[in-house]
Image: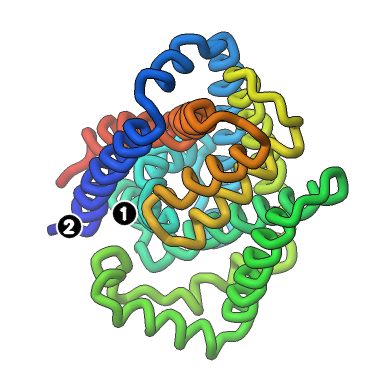
Amino acid sequence: MKKSNLIKNNGFSIIIIIMITYVGIVLYSDINKISSIFYNIKYEFLVIIIGLQMISFSLRSYRQKKFLESSGIKLSFWENFKICLAGMSMIVTPGGAGMLIKSHFLKRKYGFSVSRTAPMILAERYHDFLAVTTILLLSLIVVFSIHVVISGTVALILLFLVYLIIRNHDWLEKFEQTIIRKKIFQKIFPSDLNISDSVNSLKTPRIIGFGWIISTILWIIDAFAIFFGFVALDVDIGVVESIQIFFSSLIYGIISFLPAGIGVTEGIFIGLLLKHDVKLSIATALILFIRLTTVWFLTFVGFVTMKFFLGNEKT
C-alpha cells in the first residue's frame, strides 16, 4: 500500500476513535444540557471565527511557501494554499505527523522527493509549538497563573531539547536513525529520509526568525478566534484567561502525542474552566464548539481539498 493511502486510512481510523471519545464526553456531561447550550449559541460569531481561521491559514500557506523556497522549491501561493489545506486533513494524527502527506502530494504532482520536503513539515510543527509557548509565556505579563507557568515551562524545556538536537549534526543523525528504525514511523517516513542534510536550509537564523514571527502572528489570530468561541457561549472570564486556558490545554494535548490530544486537551480545558466556576455542561459545550470551529473545520475542508486535489492525480 502506498504511504499516502496508508496515512489517509490511519487518519480515518483516528477520526472514528475521536468521535467515539466525544460521544462519551457528551454523555458524561449531560447530553440534554449540552444540546440546549448549542441551541442558544450566538452563531453570528461563527462568521468571525471562520474568517479569522482562514486569515490564519493563509499565513500558514505563506509560511510553507517560504520554507519550501529556502529548500529551492518554488511554487505559487495558490499551489501552496491547496497543498497546505489538503495537509490539514491529517492534523488530527499524533503530533500532526500525518501532515507529512503534504510531502507525498509534492512528490506526486511536482516530483520533489519526500526526503527533501519532509523536514519542512517537521519545521512547521516545531514553529507552531514555539509560537503557542511564546504567546502563553508572554500572557503572564498581563495575568499570572501557576498552570500557565507549569505548562509553559514544560513546553520550553521540550523546545530547547529539540533545538539542541537540530543544531547538533551528530545528535540529529542519531535521532533520525532512531525514528527510521521504529516500525510505526517506517509507515510514514521514507526509507531514504535524510533529515540532517535537508534541514540545513531551515535552521538558518533568517528562516528561524521568520518562522517564529509569522507563526506567532497566525497563532495570535487563532487565539482571538478561540476567544470569540467563549463570547459565543457567554463565558466571560477575560481575553487573556480564555487564551491561557485553551493554550495550556493544547500544550498538554500535544505533549501527550495522542491524536489531536484527544481526551487530554478536553479534560484539562474543562478542569480549568471548572476552577473558574463554569458549569460542567457549559465547559464541555465550549470545548466541543471550539474544536468544531477550529481543528475540525480545517480537517473537514482539508479532506474536501484532498479529494479534489488527488482526484486529478495518477495513482
What secondary structure is found at the residue carrying circle 1? Answer: helix
- Judge from the rendering whether residue 277 lies leftward or rightward of residue 290; answer left or right: right
For the residues labelled 2 and 1, the Cα–Cα distance comes to 10 Å
Name the residue rendered at 51%, 82% in the picture: 172
Q: Amino acid at mark 2?
A: Lys
Name the residue rendered at 27%, 48% in the picture: 14
Q: Which image quarter is the N terminus in?
A: bottom left
Residue 305: % across, % down = 34, 32
Q: Dot 1 surroundings within 10 Å: few (below 14), some, or many (20 or more)?
A: many
Q: Amino acid at mark 1?
A: His
Most foreground residue, 30 or 40: 30
Residue 177: % across, % down = 38, 84
* Pointer 2 residue: 2
* Pointer 1 residue: 104
Looking at the image, residue 233 lies above or below residue 103: above
Q: Quadrant of residue 161?
A: bottom right
Q: Mark 2 near mark 1, Cβ–Cβ under 8 Å?
A: yes
Q: N-terminal of the two: label 2 or label 1?
A: 2
What secondary structure is found at the residue carrying circle 2? Answer: loop
- Judge from the rendering whether residue 311 lies leftward or rightward of residue 85; answer left or right: left
Residue 54: % across, % down = 55, 28
